[in-house]
Amino acid sequence: MENFIYHRPTKPADAVKAMKDAADGKFLSGGMTLLPTMKQGLAAPSDIIDLGGLGNSGVEVGADKVTVKAGTVHANVATDKGVKKAIPALSALAGGIGDPHVRNRGTIGGSIANNDPAADYPAAVVGLNATVVTSARSVPGDKFFTDIFTTALKDDEIVTAVEFPVPKRAAYVKFPNPASRYAMVGVMVAELKDGSVRVAVTGAGPKVFRVPEMEKALEANFSADAIGGIKVKASGLNSDMHASPEYRAHLVTVLARRAVAAAK
Amino acid sequence: MDTGIGARVRRKEDHRFITGKGQYTDDINLKDQTYAYFVRSPHAHATIKSIKEPEWAPEDGVVAVFTGEHVAEDKIGGLICGWMIHSKDGSPMKAGPHPILAQGKARYVGDHVAVVIAETKEQAKAAAARVDVTYGVLPHVVDVAKATKSKAQIHDVAPDNTVFEWSLGDKAATEAAFQRAHHVTKLDLVNNRLIPNAMEPRAAIGSYDSGSDHYTLYTTSQNPHVARLVISAFHGLAPEHKLRVIAPDVGGGFGSKIFIYAEEVVCVWASKRIGGRPIKWTAERTESFLADAHGRDHVTHAELAMDKDGHILGLKCHTLASMGAYLSTFASCVPTYLYATLLSGQYAIPAIYAEVDAIYTNTAPVDAYRGAGRPEATYLVERIVETAAREMKIDPAEFRRRNFVTSFPHQTPVIMTYDAGDYDASLKKALEIADYKGFPARKAAAAKQGKLRGIGFANYIEACGIAPSAAVGSLGAGVGLWESAEVRVNPVGTIEVLTGSHSHGQGHETTFAQLVSDRLGVDINSVAIVHGDTDKVQFGMGTYGSRSGAVGMSAISKALDKVEAKARKIAAHVMEAAEGDIEFKNGSFSVKGTDKKMAFGEVALAAYVAHKFPTSEIEPGLKETAFYDPSNFTFPAGCHICEVEIDTETGVTEIVSWTAVDDFGTVINPMIVEGQVHGGITQGIGQALTEGCVYDSESGQLLTGSYMDYCMPRATDVPSFKLGFTETKCPSNPLGMKGCGEAGAIAAPAAVMNAMTDALGVKDLAMPASPHTVWKTLQATKMAAE
């Protein structure tokens, strides 16, 4: 690991300024990806701006909305009683990320800002039609994840919170990579309060994506059988030693059906 | 509390380990210590054109950079392979040179090209990245099945990358058996390459003291004395009395820490070069993946011939065994004498012929890994026996029963003489525990849930405690495989046992103490086990091949015999009785027919005080040594039954039931033995379902270079095991022990894959049978049916 200048601002504005002033700065939240990357010499930022000093952690559960502050660790989302009641799919998703160490260090802000194609949270943000609140604006979930490891965030923009509308029912089903336990395929299915349905898939492609055909079928008939025959195309899906695009495509349908059956 | 043989004594060493008080090599820091970091080849096969150092600044902290040229200057010998194998044509195996730092060529990704020694670990690593090596990339081959026809010429001495073409058994008799066959079963098998993954990575601290002209090496070794012997005799670093090797607490080995590796030798050699400052190296996990010796990597074609009643007439096979890019310490014996000698399995097979070609590939060296050759043999035998039973429509249990060896001793056509066993007893017990009769109902119930349920057997036999030394010598071994022990009784009756065995997780401090407690009737806490230091223990062969019980403890037992015999003499003098009237029981010596009695500790004190016996006849003190060479291998055997359920939608396999009935002969501590069985089965399940080392054939890079891609089995991947034991005593050692450390890893892959192929209704299925592989198989089956 190379040397770097360490900052621990207490105000978002100071964090943004530190980033503007840095030659090649990086925001640090839970550090679950950044630190291993630095240790392996794959990243060598000039400045680390640790967002932990902002104290921006916690969950607010309202009648129609669950707001998760960006610095909230996955374990807190997973165990929060209010979240469990309002959006059990969200708390289950958070409880299935990584291992206990990761869940107690990694944050929702860090996860979505990193936009790992195999991360779980993007499926929740898109599938539950969440809004990402940043230091500068609010971004609809659908517009936030732009490409592999790339988001709508500007270099000096910080995620401050994610607002999840409380759905009518939802479930997240994940097929973990056997080695890493990242999502090889993860599917969030949600019926929102306005009756619209979202099917968001993570792990299978370069970034989270929705399956409109399934959504339409489920809006007409919210049952597993309604989507049993709907397949996503394999082309463009991820390929590695653990799963071919065809297998991933197949799993999307299987997991989506299981998510529909499990939705509550 | 009973602390003798057969008692479930809690492990004495565990308090130390689980409270963080273990002393591993990396926990040790010496005065003025420096740190080594290795420059490793990024190419699978390349010439080294030049190695250039930048101008180092003081803040770089660089002490020295060494390359193969410095090694050559000091005439430090290369790494050796200690088992000579001759090809069918009588020619000796073709071992290419394996210098401790590459000379002219790098032959796999991770090959040790240069070493940087610096003031801190971080400085060494940063500096290593700045050493400029110019490579000339050469063609490479990583796949053993393609290596003999590859453009890559890995070692000049080995045309077609072939180390040897060896055979065992009677070819003509086997061909004749196949001529008579009613049915022949043919099977192609790949025994997937595995990476050992001990919890503690390899580490070393080498130091040189110019005052005494003496070297010390702390290292993560399963056999420190063998390391000293090799470093002294073959690397030529220093004579043995000028070299001390210490293997302190070692956190797992599974075979991978048997071998003498380049990094450890470099640390101790280079210390003198930098004026005697100690040099420490601890492998990063990535280096463990790249540069620890890997296991397995066989490609095999096998055929089994049967008569019309399913009696086996003959077995033949041809195996390609990858050696990696160099021959590691015992690489050559693994696919030969530890493999083909067990191809008779538990069965009376009249004729066997095995051909094994050992092949170089541009991959990490391959050597012994938990089971070493025996898992490969069991996988072949048990997969083909199961397949033959299915093809002949004979119940697989019945098929095995028909072919069991039932009388002992039994001479197989492949060297081994099985000394004792009752294979039907373990099968019978396993069938009961597994409720074999209830399987069809369980399969039907699973089908209702949309799951495919399958059952698979593995009736394994293995060979432990490789012996006797003369016999293994005649097969090409460079060493004898006896063991030594020294029992030191202190004047107050406490006991130190010095053993040439080495514990790296097995619990020797407990089991060995149990033997002493049992024999001398002393408190287990008054017994200390000393191992792992060549300055303390005179010599030893170390721990591997499940030998420490059968061989190591037998040596201790022999030394205890001598201690008891001398103590009897002393007790007789002290109690003024005839030696023949002395009885020794429950830790006390008594005179037959009287109430005269002396506790063991009192006799020990009398031995050292030496007032009451003629020292002209009996030497003072109470200390005995023994070197024990067994008269035969031991043959642990058993029956494992695995049941799986496969989710047909996802391809996910769940192991829903596991029965293991093992015959290990005498069991010293059932709790520790059960732990060994659990661990072994879990490793075997890992091989069958999750683990597989993958090199990219295009680039030669190791694709499974971290836990992100190399899938170790987790607790959730294994069921709760149902264990049972049968017991036939081993006749070739005084304790009747056979060995238990590898059995699970030997039996499990075949049991799992037999269950998987049963569930899927297919003949062939590759390991690891990951969900993806299973799904593809399901798709292919579905397409074939449509």
Image: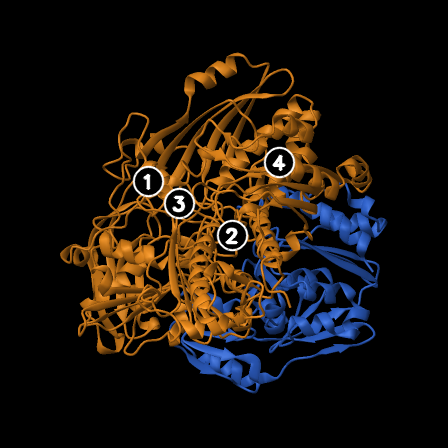
Chain colours: A blue, B orange
Q: Is residue B548 above or below residue B348?
A: below
Q: Quadrant of residue A172?
A: bottom right
Q: CA distance from mark 2 to mark 4?
A: 36 Å
Decide which of B310, B472 is in the foreground and name it: B472
Crowd rating for badge 3 (residues with CA inside 10 Å; few <14, some 14–19, many 20+): many
Nearest to N terminus: mark 4 or mark 3: 3
Q: Residue furthest bottom?
A: A10
Horizontal and vertical percent for residue A37? Answer: 46, 65
Chain ID of residue with mark 4: B
Question: Which residue has dot 1 on it?
Answer: B473
Instruction: State which quadrant residue A22 falls in.
Output: bottom left
Q: Chain of mark 3?
A: B
Do marks 4 and 3 share a chain?
A: yes
| Discs 4/3, front | 4
Rendered residue at 49%/83% (across/down): A17
Specify whether disc 3 shares its chain with disc 2: yes
Describe residue B195's horizontal placement relative to residue A120 as left or right.
left
Q: Nearer the viewer, mark 2 or mark 4?
A: 4
Residue B285 position, x and y percent, is 44, 61
Q: Chain of mark 1?
A: B
Q: Secondary structure at mark 2?
A: loop
Type of amino acid under label 2: Tyr
Q: CB atoms at circles 1 and 3 under 8 Å apart? A: no
